[in-house]
């Protein structure tokens, strides 16, 4: 397991982080998981709005860099500028279960999230592991405040389930981040002399965290490797020189990585030792800083751990059987077998992933895991079977992986080994793809909205948008309207992604009195469409240039069958232009109706072209 912590100081991501993640080395082949904790990611209002529409640039960077090495984003959590990302090799995904996240604000007395902690906990081969990324209060004299905040984080963060409800209840805890502990007593001249002379051991005993580990009960049991690298704070940005400003802050090891193994429970037989199945040991193989990164006033710190334990889980919850190659559409048959005790859901699906995919929603296509005799297959331990339609299959040659996504656990419960798909390209399909590609290159103003559970729109295309996405706060007097242009290829990674959208997209209009409420009561507004995202996304309704949230429980929020993972593309249009068109339609005798189902045909006094747009 590799753990990385970095206070990025609101900087833009660097172009290359391979050395930080210890990639392109022999160590990478042995690493199974990577946890990355970031602090002070730019969280100004305009940047947060952009990150709400798109995946943030730091997360995109790490997914882009790690996916070629077969690392998949397992989970992520963000609290303002504090982000935690957990990656794992794809073949470990079925053995990573019970994934949960939590966050605790401690800034401004618990009301602000610039300080605090975010965590991801999960079961790894049956052992409960928690990753905790913290940003604690700054300054030399705030040591007691740091202790209180850490105790608050440990107390506040609670998880669901029969085991490991608190952070310290886990079998293994990794605690890391900008912990902001400083060097006491020694003046800045001596500290710099010790650094230049490489006698760092003379600074260890004055390090506040080293002192606290032996005096604070809350830190009992936490371990850390030797600090054989120079203090990681504070540097002049763009250099490897310590603070030369008027404040001349004293160098300190603010960025740290610690771990704690849960002590054996009392009452075990055989002299108090736990059974061999529960034995867990941790060895730190590397603990270092990376001086080559200069975008921040902090240097990133990385550690590599070898974690040894007896596996409590031998088989995945779902085993998938597939042919070695699909060269004809009729070969796209998937057989799968669910383990005893597996919590099957009618919202489970099987995704087809290209080798090198970035996260569980980064599929090429999918099929619902809804065989007619699914329950009988589960009870009698028989194989169920589903088939991919010809339209859902990718054309051309490539390596792919199948994964069974469990809606109950929000994780992949089974994967296959890579297999080959070799289907002939149709002339129509290739021309459609070419025209779609050229269209996206010409139109850089298109906004693609992400559903909350989605990690990235349109696999492989976000890198281009990462630095060019417009900041909505700068566009005064703009509203969002559905795009009426036929784009040829949908941005949604769903089975319908290769079909053209209809040119006339009906707009949903709600009366003023209903828009005043947070949720929209609309049971009569249409039937819910099925999608692998469930009901976890939001739609918006226009009212005088504003965007109104609609409750995820409302059928209105699920009415459009194209909302399978991603919201439809939008275009920006001036308010005056939109209102002018509305005035035109009113002059021609078209009046907006009071209610309209998104599935109903145009009518009831609305213009077929403009619908019920305000």
Image: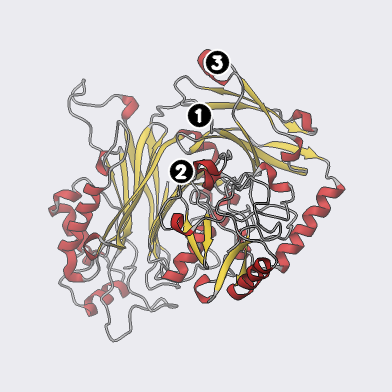
- Position of residue 353 measured from the top left corner of the image (x, y, whole percent): 63, 42
Q: Are marks 2 and 3 in contact (CB under 8 Å)?
A: no
Residue linked to disc 1: 345
Q: Residue at x 17, y 62 (%)?
A: 145
Image point (58%, 38%), residue name: 530
The residue carrying mark 2 is: 553
Q: Quadrant of residue 435?
A: bottom right
The answer to which of 196 and 402 lies nearer the viewer is: 402
Q: Is residue 186 left or right of residue 607?
A: left
- Quadrant (top left/top right/bottom left/bottom right) for the C terminus: bottom right
Residue drawn 61% across the image and 56% down it: 507
Graded by Cα atoms within 10 Å as few (under 14), some (14 to 19) or many (20 or more), the crowding at tag 2 reads some
Q: Rounded to the nearest whole Å, what is the CA distance between mark 2 and mark 3?
A: 31 Å
Please state the horizontal and vertical placement of residue 1, each as a whole percent of the image.
Answer: 42, 46
Disc marking residue 376: 3
Q: How many marks?
A: 3
| Name of the residue lying farthest toward the front | 589
The x, y position of residue 311, in whole percent, is 41, 29
**Label located before the other in sequence (1 or 3):** 1
Q: Earlier in the sequence, mark 1 or mark 2?
A: 1
Q: CA distance from mark 1 to mark 3?
A: 14 Å
CA–CA distance between discs 1 and 2? 18 Å
Q: Count neighbours of disc 3 (C-alpha within 10 A) and say few if under 14, some if 14 to 19, many if 20 or more.
A: few
Q: Is residue 18 visible?
A: no
The foreground one among 56 and 11 is 56
Query: Label 1 crowding class (10 Å Cα cut-off): few <14, some 14-19, many 20+?
Result: some
Residue located 50% across and 51% down the image: 538
Dot 2 or dot 3: first in sequence order is 3
Q: Under tag 3, what secondary structure?
A: helix
**Above or below, comparing residue 355 to residue 310 in the picture:** below
């Amino acid at each position: 397991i590799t753990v990385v912590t970095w206070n990025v100081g609101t900087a833009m991501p660097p172009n290359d982080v391979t050395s930080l993640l210890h990639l392109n080395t022999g160590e990478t082949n042995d690493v199974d998981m990577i946890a990355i904790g970031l602090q002070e990611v730019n969280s100004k209002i305009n940047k947060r709005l952009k990150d709400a529409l798109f995946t943030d640039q730091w997360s995109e960077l790490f997914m882009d860099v790690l996916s070629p090495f077969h690392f998949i984003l397992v989970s992520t959590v963000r609290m303002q500028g504090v982000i935690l990302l957990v990656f794992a090799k794809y073949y470990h995904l079925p053995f990573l279960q019970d994934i949960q996240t939590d966050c605790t604000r401690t800034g401004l007395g618990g009301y602000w999230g610039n300080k605090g902690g975010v965590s991801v906990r999960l079961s790894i081969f049956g052992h409960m592991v928690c990753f905790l990324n913290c940003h604690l209060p700054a300054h030399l004299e705030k040591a007691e405040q740091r202790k209180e905040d850490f105790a608050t984080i440990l107390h506040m963060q609670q998880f669901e389930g029969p085991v490991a409800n608190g952070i310290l209840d886990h079998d293994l805890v990794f605690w890391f981040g900008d912990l902001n502990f400083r060097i006491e007593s020694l003046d800045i001249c001596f500290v710099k002399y010790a650094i230049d002379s490489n006698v760092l051991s003379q600074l260890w005993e004055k390090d506040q965290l080293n002192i606290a580990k032996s005096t604070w009960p809350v830190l009992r049991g936490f371990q850390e490797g030797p600090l054989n690298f120079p203090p990681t704070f504070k540097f002049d940005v763009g250099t490897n020189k310590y603070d030369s400003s008027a404040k001349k802050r004293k160098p300190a090891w603010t960025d740290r990585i610690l771990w704690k193994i849960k002590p054996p429970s009392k009452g075990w037989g055989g002299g108090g030792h736990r059974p061999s199945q529960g034995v867990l040991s941790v060895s730190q193989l590397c603990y270092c800083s990376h001086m080559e990164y200069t975008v921040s006033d902090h240097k990133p710190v990385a550690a590599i751990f070898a974690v040894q334990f007896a596996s409590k889980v031998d088989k995945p919850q779902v085993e998938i059987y597939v042919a070695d190659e699909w060269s004809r559409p009729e070969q796209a048959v998937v057989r799968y077998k669910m383990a005893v005790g597996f919590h099957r859901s009618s919202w489970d699906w099987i995704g087809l992933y290209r080798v090198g995919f970035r996260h569980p929603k980064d599929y090429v296509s999918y099929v619902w895991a809804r065989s007619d005799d699914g329950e009988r297959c589960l009870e009698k331990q028989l194989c169920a079977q589903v088939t991919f339609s010809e339209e859902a299959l990718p054309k051309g040659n490539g390596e792919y992986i199948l994964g069974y996504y469990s809606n109950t656990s929000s994780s992949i419960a089974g994967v296959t080994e890579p297999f080959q798909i070799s289907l002939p390209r149709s002339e129509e399909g290739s021309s459609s793809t070419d025209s779609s590609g050229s269209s996206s290159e010409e139109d850089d103003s298109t906004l693609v909205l992400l559903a909350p559970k989605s990690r990235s729109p349109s696999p492989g295309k976000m890198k281009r948008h990462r630095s060019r996405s417009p900041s909505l706060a700068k566009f005064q007097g703009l509203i969002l309207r559905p795009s009426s242009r036929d784009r040829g290829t949908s941005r949604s990674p769903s089975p319908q992604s290769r079909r053209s959208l209809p040119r006339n997209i009906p707009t949903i209009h709600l009366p003023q009195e209903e828009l005043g409420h947070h949720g929209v009561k609309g049971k009569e507004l249409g039937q819910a469409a099925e999608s692998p995202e469930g009901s976890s996304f939001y739609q918006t309704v226009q009212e005088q240039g504003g965007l109104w949230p609609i409750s995820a429980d409302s059928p209105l929020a699920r009415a459009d069958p194209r909302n399978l993972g991603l919201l439809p593309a939008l275009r920006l249009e001036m308010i005056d232009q939109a209102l002018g068109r509305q005035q035109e339609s009113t002059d021609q005798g078209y009046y907006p109706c009071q209610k309209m189902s998104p599935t109903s045909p145009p009518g009831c006094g609305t213009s077929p072209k403009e619908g019920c747009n305000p």
